[in-house]
Amino acid sequence: MKTRQLGMHGPHVSAIGVGALSFSNFYGAAEDEESHKVLDAALDLGINHIDTSNVYGNGRSETVIGSFLSKQGKLKGQLFTIASKVGICRDSETGQRYFDNTESHIRDQLDKSLKRLGVEALDLYYIHRRDETIPIEDVAGTMGKLVEEGKIKSYGFSEIAPSSLKLAQSVGYVAAVQSEYSLSTRNPEMGLTQLTKASGTALVAFSPVGRSLLTHNPHTEERISGMDFLKENPRFVEPNLSRNIAITDTFRNLADELSISASGLAIAWLLHQGDNIIPIPGTRKVKHLKELAEGARRNLSSEESALIEEALPIGWAHGNRYSLSQSKAVEQYC
């Protein structure tokens, strides 16, 4: 497995990581045993980076990872580079989301994440969503304290604009920015890919296979009916869903011609966009993980890259990537 550096001061990790949202029930029922099999397979494939969050399954994702690590004995602290996140909250009475970047909340949730994971420090800790009532410079200062105390080794921000990254960088080094980035979501190319590359910051790309649209097995309307998030996501609501599947059929056909899975081709394209980009696809299936890893081994030629761009030119997708409620605290730019 090829490696990439997780920020200019960070460790070298596998070119792709495991997005552990799939270890919760976000995209359908997930079994702990099945998740452990994915982690076992990841190690066999040379994948050593896991990305999770305190809110994935209300702590379940971290707990599943922790239970897997607990079985590894003395090796548990050497197997994976672990990233988690903080900042999204949900009101226990109304169920409404809100965002908290206060130092007391960050510290409290970090302690709980460390306990669930069974580790002494996190390799990377993200602010999952911005709390607009607190200047990002102050939040970066809080994260810097945690680095000094040895509770985290580096920090980053998720779904922020390049302008916010510059403000955070005025306080200290930001190791990573996490954003949705794929052939179906290319917003980061409007400033974020350029700034992260110039500043030595890793761009960690979530949903790199377009929440299934860039695979050989895109979600159907029937399957989506059991997924609360996708049921209201504009790209997966008719007539957009049918349009998007029809358009991406061309990409699937191209993958067949190039003798690679569509998932693998989507990963190969993303890695081709920059050496600081680290995709973190999620999956509950070992077979799919192997397809994703295939993409990390594939070096695209300029001709192949051009064919991909021809099949899925920028702006092809129907529907926004989030609904209005899903886009709260996601920073828009350009």
Image (tube, helix red, strand yellow):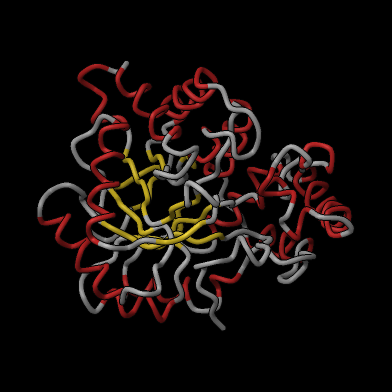
Residue at the front extreme of this rendering: 93
Q: Nearer the viewer, residue 96 or 64?
A: 96
Q: In which quadrant of the rendered image does the N terminus lie?
A: top left
Q: Residue at x 55, y 66 (%)?
A: 328
Residue 63 sits in quarter? top left
Q: Where is residue 56 in the image (x, y as percent from the top left)?
A: 48, 41
Q: Position of residue 303 (x, y in %)?
A: 69, 61
Q: Nearer the viewer, residue 57 or 151?
A: 57
Q: Which of 12 and 156 is in front in this view?
A: 156
Residue 173 sits in quarter? bottom left
Count up the numbered dots: 0
Residue 32 placement, left or right of 211: left
Q: Residue at x 72, y 65 (%)?
A: 309
Q: Where is residue 313 in the image (x, y as percent from the top left)?
A: 75, 68
Q: Give the vertical position of 41 relative to 180 (above or below).
A: above
Q: Give the vertical position of 38 relative to 325 (above or below).
A: above
Residue 161 placement, left or right of 251: left
Q: Which of 201 and 150 is in front in this view?
A: 150
Q: Give the vertical position of 238 relative to 73 (above or below).
A: below
Q: In which quadrant of the rendered image does the C terminus lie?
A: bottom right
Q: Where is residue 121 in the image (x, y as percent from the top left)?
A: 20, 41
Q: Which residue is drawn at 20% across and 19% down?
A: 74
Q: Residue at x 27, y 61 (%)?
A: 8
Q: Give the vertical position of 21 relative to 182 (above or below).
A: above
Residue 19 placement, left or right of 72: right
